[in-house]
Amino acid sequence: MPISMNGVSGTDYSSIINQTSTSGLENTLNSANKGQVTDEKMMEACKEFEQYMIEQIYKGMQKTIIKADEEENQYTEYFGDMQVQEYAKAAVNQGGFGLAQQMYDAMIRNQGPTSITQIQTEQ
């Protein structure tokens, strides 16, 4: 029995995923501004941002490829974004571009000491 996907468009799915990704990242960064974030959460937010950047780069590269009509089918249209996300996630898990680590280091450096023990340790 074939699966029908007539009610869902690929662009709708793509916009929902992008909104979810960016809203999750915004929530993590907003909690970082309130001092409620751990180092692990900060690094996770940096990795999410790097993953999002890699997704956008990959999507831009895909637009430059001329495809034959038979290469595109209904399923690649709908699930192509999921494939791109998984590629980006795999790239980040394998070290990515190093953007996440650089952002994390900059955030830690700019955060400064937040407790008495950190101030004493740095002196």
Image (cartoon, rainbow, N blue to C red):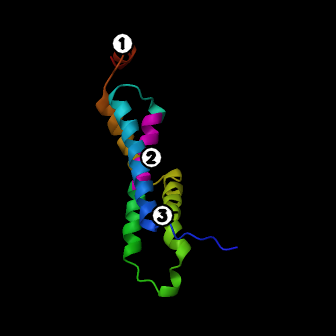
Q: Is residue 68 visible?
A: yes
Q: In the rendered view, would you say 106 is above or below 61?
A: above
Q: Nearer the viewer, mark 2 or mark 3?
A: 3
Q: Which mark is residue 47?
A: 2
Lower sequence index among marks 2 and 3: 2
Q: In the rendered view, would you say 115 is above or below 66?
A: above
The amino acid pointed to by label 3 is Asp
- The residue beneath circle 3 is 81
- The residue beneath circle 1 is 116
- Report x, y in % for residue 43: 44, 39
Q: Nearer the viewer, mark 3 or mark 1?
A: 3
Asked whether the beta carbons under mark 2 and mark 3 sit within 8 Å of each other, the answer is: no
The amino acid pointed to by label 1 is Ile
Q: Secondary structure at mark 2?
A: helix
Task: Locate residue 54 relative to residue 89 in the image: left or right.
Answer: left
- Report x, y in % for residue 85: 49, 59
Write down the region rendered in magenta: 41-52
Q: Residue furthest front?
A: 7
Q: Looking at the image, which is closer to me, 30 or 7?
A: 7
Label tally: 3
The amino acid pointed to by label 2 is Lys
Q: Secondary structure at mark 3?
A: helix
In percent of the image, x 43 and y 55: which residue is there? 16
Q: Is residue 98 visible?
A: no
Q: Which mark is residue 101?
A: none
